[in-house]
Amino acid sequence: MRAAPGWTRWLVPLVLLFVWLGVGGTLGPYAGKLGEVATNDQSAFLPQSAESTKVLKAREAFDEAETLPAIIVWTADGNRITDARRATATRTVGALAGRTGIVGAPSPALPSEDGKALQAVVQLRPDLGDRLPGVLDSVREAARGVPGTTAQIAGPAASQADLGDAFAGIDGLLLGVALGAVLLILLLVYRSVLLPFVIIFGAVFALGLACAVVYALADHGVVRVDGQVQGILSILVIGAATDYALLLAARFREELATGRDRASAAVAAARRSFGAITASAATVALALLALLASDLTNNRALGPVGAIGIVCAVLSALTFLPAVLALLGRAAYWPSRPKTSDASVEGHGVWHRVAREVGARPRAVWVVTALGLAVLAAFSPTLSAKGVPLDEIFVNDAPSVAAQKTLGEHFPGGSGNPAVVIADSGRAAQVTAAARATDGVASAAAVTVSGRPGGGAPKVVDGRVRIDATLKDAADSDAAKRTVERLRARVHAVPGADALVGGYTAQQYDTQRTSARDRTVIVPVVLGIILLILVLLLRSLLVPVLLVATVGLNFLATLGVSSLVFTHVFGFGGADASVPLYGFVFLVALGVDYNIFLMSRVREEALVHGNRQGVLRGLTTTGGVITSAGVVLAATFAALTVIPLAFLVQIAFIVAFGVLLDTLVVRSLLVPAMVLDIGPRAWWPSVLPRDGAAAVPGAHSANGVEGAGV
């Protein structure tokens, strides 16, 4: 670099800068356009091989047109609903027939057993999209025309409208909150004017590129995007791009402090950070791709989309950032200026003291730390991941949730969400009788040619009939899921019926079982991927095993704390069935990141100074940047809480808390103390110099005189 002509040394950074500016200007708008190719169809979240999914496909044949049910529920302002009000309600909903978005004739208003409520079903077109809230408003307004009653709308249509409302404006709101949090933290930590904005621009450019690629793939049906995947992609790219940028920027500062010119410092920083950054990115990307082994569509959708985001984050960190740093030099850190002491172990106040304490009593430190994490991990089995009850899906007061609660107070708990049985038409009577005899079933009747259960001849399609079984318990309850188990056993036992049981409760039950299956398949795959990458990076067998064990312990400790917080602070009745798997993939893969950053530097220093000094120097020199990266990543995931869905709030807490626990405890205390206590044997089969011995031949220091590139 020093011997090259001056103009050539600036040509490459300028070209890279203009390329990324072009990417940002051309592809940046796609960060706000993913909603155009996203779908929030809840049926796409179901297990592909489950019985309930087969029923969902089979029941389509019984609908003359695919519809989205909206359930109107009226409650009496007084004691009871009179016959006159019931007649008015029936006329009111009948007048809705033929209106925009409404399919067929609504059902008549049916009274509850206590006489205090009515319900009617209005079938809506499923392709209304953004027009759905408006159609529901018109239905609600008409329903309010029944005097002496209060009208609410429940059912799938109302839930889908509230879900769409929860994701409305996700692009701008989530991105603004995440970037604002990152910028504030960077300004406070680095007290630099330019560097935080450079890092933010790099993250935004990476997100624009990732969203453009995902948009093109989703538009052609190659990948699937929903609101949850869309939100997680934004957070993942911003957090990862910022983390990688912080690591490289810290290394650039060290190179400048040794006296290198800015172009040479940028090249050296990129080269010496390349191994740790790419290994970290490969860990996260491959862990995400392991989700392709899931039987849940939304899990499989996140895998390739998230991996694309990580690749774009790496490209930005290793090309855009070095180019800008090469052009800015020391000005990037203004008003502070890198000093020679920045490249040494001295001058890192708090982390020098942490390293000294860890080095003085390593065994005591790791034993106490491990025991503390084990105590927290003991609470992990108490985390209930059986699904989020309907009244807790939204963390705010969603209208559909309130309506469903009202419906359940006056009608059987499963009203509006019956178990759906598809069976051979020749065994319809036997299957219906078996369903009625099942403990927990309130009623069961075959759907007739009129499209409603009971009151006529069963509707037969391709030799099959549909039987709706209303459950006594709320459709989202554990009791209802147990009823589905019993119902399946009963109808499966009817000879020749070839019966299948689906519906909302069955879908929740199948999703819960599939999630448990996914964990048993995907968790070992992810651990194997991480272990292999660590072995290749660190050229050791024992250290990678220790790192995987520590991040696993951190994950269990985080689940233990989450169980306590979800129950006693947030008041959640349970966690979504996918939460443990998502939490594992994000937390373990991202947690290994910080250990990769630390241990790659430790190995580099240990090749020169021996194991003990290598650990202490690695901890001291990386302490500040890794802690900053952890705080930034925790803040970006915490931004998911702006979306009022329990699933995303739970994921946000698990990842944010787990990353902080990993950064401040596991990486700072547990890992370095264990490696110190084991000694040079930890790096077997690699041979490192003994403490105080000469450096390994060919090694080069971190300041450019001695040490090893990673």
Image: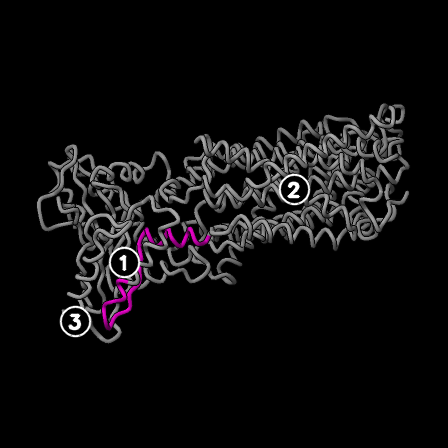
- Report the side of 90 relative to 249 (left or right): left
Q: Which residue is mark 1?
A: 413
Q: Horizontal and vertical percent for residue 628?
A: 72, 49
Q: Earlier in the sequence, mark 3 or mark 1?
A: 3
Q: Which residue is mark 3?
A: 82
Element type where label 3 sits in the image: loop
Element type where label 1 sits in the image: loop
Residue at the (50%, 61%) spot, across then down: 570
Q: Amino acid at mark 1?
A: Gly
Q: Amino acid at mark 2?
A: Ala
| Rendered image: mark on residue 106 | none
Q: Horizontal and vertical percent for residue 23?
A: 63, 35
Quarter of image, res 705: top right
- Report the side of 82 relative to 475 (left or right): left
Question: Can you tell which of label 2 and label 1 is closer to the viewer?
Answer: 2
Span highlighted in magenta in the image:
142-166
Q: Residues within 10 Å of mark 3 (few under 14, many from 20)?
A: some
Q: Horizontal and vertical percent for residue 28?
A: 60, 40
Residue at the (78%, 42%) spot, across then down: 250
Could you tell me how far apart the alpha carbons at marks 3 and 1 are, in whole angstroms?
23 Å
Question: Can you tell which of label 3 and label 1 is closer to the viewer?
Answer: 3
- Outermost residue, bottom side: 78
Q: Amino acid at mark 3?
A: Thr
662 vs 255, nearest the viewer: 255
- Colour scheme of the picture: one colour
- Is residue 241 visible in this depiction of the protein? yes
Element type where label 2 sits in the image: helix
Could you tell me how far apart the alpha carbons at marks 2 and 3 are, in whole angstroms?
62 Å
Q: Horizontal and vertical percent for residue 565?
A: 53, 59
| Rendered image: mark on residue 203 | 2
Q: Is residue 462 magenta?
A: no
